Image (spheres, rainbow, N blue to C red):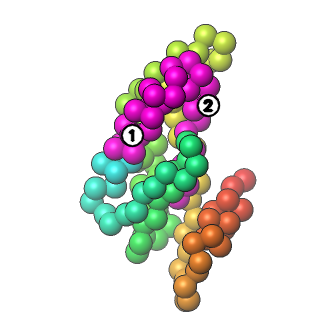
Amino acid sequence: MQCDVDYFRYYNQIYDYEQGDLTLIKIVNIIENSLEEVISITWLCDGDEFGIILPNSDENKTKQFAEKISQNIDNAKIVLDSHNQNIDYLSLRIDAYTVYPKEKIPYTNFLKMIRNSRS
């Protein structure tokens, strides 16, 4: 899965980068707590993007975890005080890709598959 924090650049402009870093840590904790019952690998890819690998997870389980993560982020109600935008809280956009490899797939190719799966 690849997760983008919606409006995070705007969040940093309002609250500053130090608060933004603390918020990213909070988001990572929410993601990791959402996945506590499975083996997973979570990392920060690029500023406000997270990667998540769920070994041995099929499409249905992956979708369930994506929904759980999204719901837990929504429930955290991380405030985005946007007077000009019509947005009250930060949210995540989650893209998921399930692969059943018969051979090893290089990491960079896997990320390309995820990015290309976006609609």
x and y percent of residue 41 in the render?
Answer: 40, 62
Closer to the camera in the image, 87 or 59: 87
Closer to the camera in the image, 117 or 60: 117
Q: Quadrant of residue 109?
A: bottom right
x and y percent of residue 14 in the render?
Answer: 56, 18
**Mark 1: amino acid:** Ile
Q: Is residue 117 magenta?
A: no
Is residue 99 depicted above or below 27 in this figure? below
Closer to the camera in the image, 2 or 19: 19
Residue at image mark 1: 25
Q: Which secondary structure is most common in the magenta stretch? A: helix
Q: In this view, which residue lies farthest toward the bottom?
A: 102
SS at badge 1? helix
x and y percent of residue 32 in the render?
Answer: 34, 51
Residue at image mark 2: 9
Q: Is residue 86 left or right of residue 55?
A: right
SS at badge 2? helix
Q: Earlier in the sequence, mark 1 or mark 2?
A: 2
Q: Quadrant of residue 61?
A: bottom left
The magenta region covers: 1-30
Which residue sits at x=62%, y=65%?
A: 111
Within-10-Å neighbours for mark 2: few <14, some 14–19, many 20+: some
Q: In this view, which residue lies farthest toward the left?
A: 37
